Image (tube, rainbow, N blue to C red):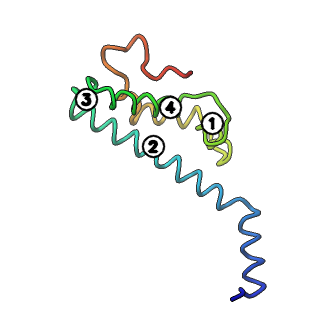
């Protein structure tokens, strides 16, 4: 079954203006922000989680995402650039909301999330 010509033309125009791609990357960023909030809440409720390596690794990966300097496809800076958002401003807001809770208390001088 074929689609009417005008619908096919609309589909092509939708892809060409990049809205679908932007929406995908916005969803990726939203998920990362949500994950940061969940991890921050978990560690506030259960500080002993810092003793578990899987938790520390999950935090490390998330913090590397937000603090990375790469413009590689899928990186925080790539997504911010694509959606025309200042990555430093967004990171500052995330720091105030969630990321400050994801610094291991006994590692305050050497951040767990140092960018690679």
Q: Is residue 69 above or below residue 35?
A: above
Q: Is mark 2 on a helix, strand or loop?
A: helix
> Left or right: 66 with respect to 78?
left
Using the numbered discs, state the Cα–Cα distance from disc 2 to disc 3 in whole angstroms.
20 Å
Q: How crowded is mark 3: few (under 14 residues within 10 Å), some or many (20 or more)?
A: some
Q: Which of marks 2 and 3 is in front?
A: 3
Displayed quadrant of residue 54:
top left
- Mark number for residue 44? none
Location of mark 3 (residue): 49
Q: Is mark 4 on a helix, strand or loop?
A: helix
Using the numbered discs, state the Cα–Cα distance from disc 2 to disc 1 in whole angstroms.
14 Å
The quadrant the N terminus occupies is bottom right
Location of mark 1 (residue): 77
Location of mark 4 (residue): 92
Give the image location of residue 42, x and y in percent. 27, 37
Q: Is mark 3 on a helix, strand or loop?
A: helix
Q: Nearer the viewer, mark 4 or mark 3?
A: 3
Counting residues from the start of the chain, the first of labels 2 and 1 encountered is 2
The answer to whether the residue labelled 2 contacts the one labelled 3, judged by CB atoms less than 8 Å apart, is no
- Mark number for residue 33? 2
Q: Residues within 10 Å of mark 2 (few under 14, many from 20)?
A: some
The answer to whether the residue labelled 1 contacts the one labelled 4, judged by CB atoms less than 8 Å apart, is no
Give the image location of residue 8, x and y in percent. 75, 79
Q: How crowded is mark 4: few (under 14 residues within 10 Å), some or many (20 or more)?
A: few
Question: What is the count of numbered marks?
Answer: 4
Counting residues from the start of the chain, the first of labels 1 and 4 encountered is 1
Q: Which of marks 4 and 2 is in front?
A: 2
Q: Which of marks 1 and 3 is in front?
A: 3
């Amino acid at each position: 079954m074929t689609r009417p010509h005008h619908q096919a033309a609309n589909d092509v125009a939708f892809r060409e203006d990049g809205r679908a791609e932007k929406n995908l990357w916005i969803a990726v960023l939203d998920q990362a922000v949500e994950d940061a909030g969940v991890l921050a809440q978990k560690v506030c409720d259960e500080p002993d989680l810092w003793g578990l390596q899987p938790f520390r690794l999950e935090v490390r990966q998330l913090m590397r995402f937000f603090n990375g300097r790469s413009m590689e496809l899928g990186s925080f800076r790539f997504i911010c650039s694509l959606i025309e958002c200042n990555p430093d401003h967004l990171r500052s807001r995330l720091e105030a909301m969630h990321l400050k809770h994801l610094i291991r208390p006994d590692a305050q001088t050497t951040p767990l999330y140092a960018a690679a």
